[in-house]
Amino acid sequence: MPVRIDTAPYEAIIGRYHLGGLIGVPPAASGIIIFAHASGSGRFSPRNNQIAAAMRRSGMATLLIDLLTGQEETSRANMFDVHLLASRLASATQWVREQPEIAQLPIGYFGASTGVGAALIAAAKDQHIAAIVSRSGRPDLALNTLALVRAPTLLLVGSLDGPAIDVNHQAFTRLRCPKKIQVIAGAGHLFEEPGTLDQLVANAIGWFSTCFARHGQPMAAGRR
């Protein structure tokens, strides 16, 4: 089934693993963002769908996918197997590149929690990923590959999410790509506090917009 140019998301079957997906492609999209969900989450996550809707309003295409099949999700081990999740993310990325309507768009990854580890591992093996944004992420799950990531990476954490702050600062020092870490005041792990999700979305959209515009051009390594 060909990809539709349609801001409203619609369901699609993605890649050779037949993953369930929700894709939305606004006219003249500047890039496409593939979501790597946290363990136990999926394409119908209300929070990620809210974020994706804002991204589409800003002119970016989005793809929310379930990285595991229904049967695979019954195994807790699969939900935390970041290498398995990374392989599925890579498969979805390949699917995007095979669709004529969106094949030329820069690709970014938006990860949450364990999905961030998968996104970083996938990007370490794919030098053409344009950008990564992490929300309350677990980049420590990809420690052995962080130095290989070349995609500009933004780590977003809440000031009330103490464990995540420590983990993200540790990972930040290992990244060798253009990078930034942003601690959002008053936000917890899920960014449920008033106004905090809006701040996260604004930071993510700004990062993706800049990286998509510069894709293919050299970027200087960033600083904290």
Image (cartoon, rainbow, N blue to C red):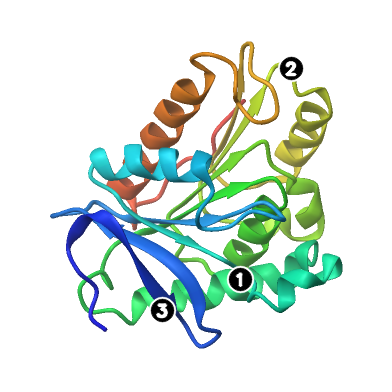
| Place of residue 46 in the rendered image (x, y in percent of width and height, measured from the top left) | 50, 42
Amino acid found under the numbered disc labelled 3: Trp
Give the left or right position of residue 206, taking residue 113 as reference: left
Quadrant where the image shows the C terminus = top right
Q: Tell me how far mark 2 sits from mark 3, CA to CA.
A: 38 Å
Q: Tell me how far mark 1 sits from mark 2, CA to CA.
A: 33 Å
Identify the disc placed on residue 95: 3
Q: Which residue is mark 1?
A: 125
| Place of residue 44 in the rendered image (x, y in percent of width and height, measured from the top left) | 50, 54
Q: Which residue is mark 2?
A: 160
Marks 2 and 3, the one that precedes in the sequence? 3
Say what secondary structure mark 2 lies in: loop
Identify the disc placed on residue 77: none
Residue at the bottom extreme of this rendering: 16
The image quadrant that residue 188 belongs to is: top right
Residue at the left extreme of this rendering: 27
The structure residue drawn at horizontal position 76% and vertical position 41%, both measured from the top left corner, is 171
**Pointer 1 local density, CA inside 10 Å: few below 14, some 14–19, many at least 20:** some
In contact (CB < 8 Å): disc 1 and disc 2: no
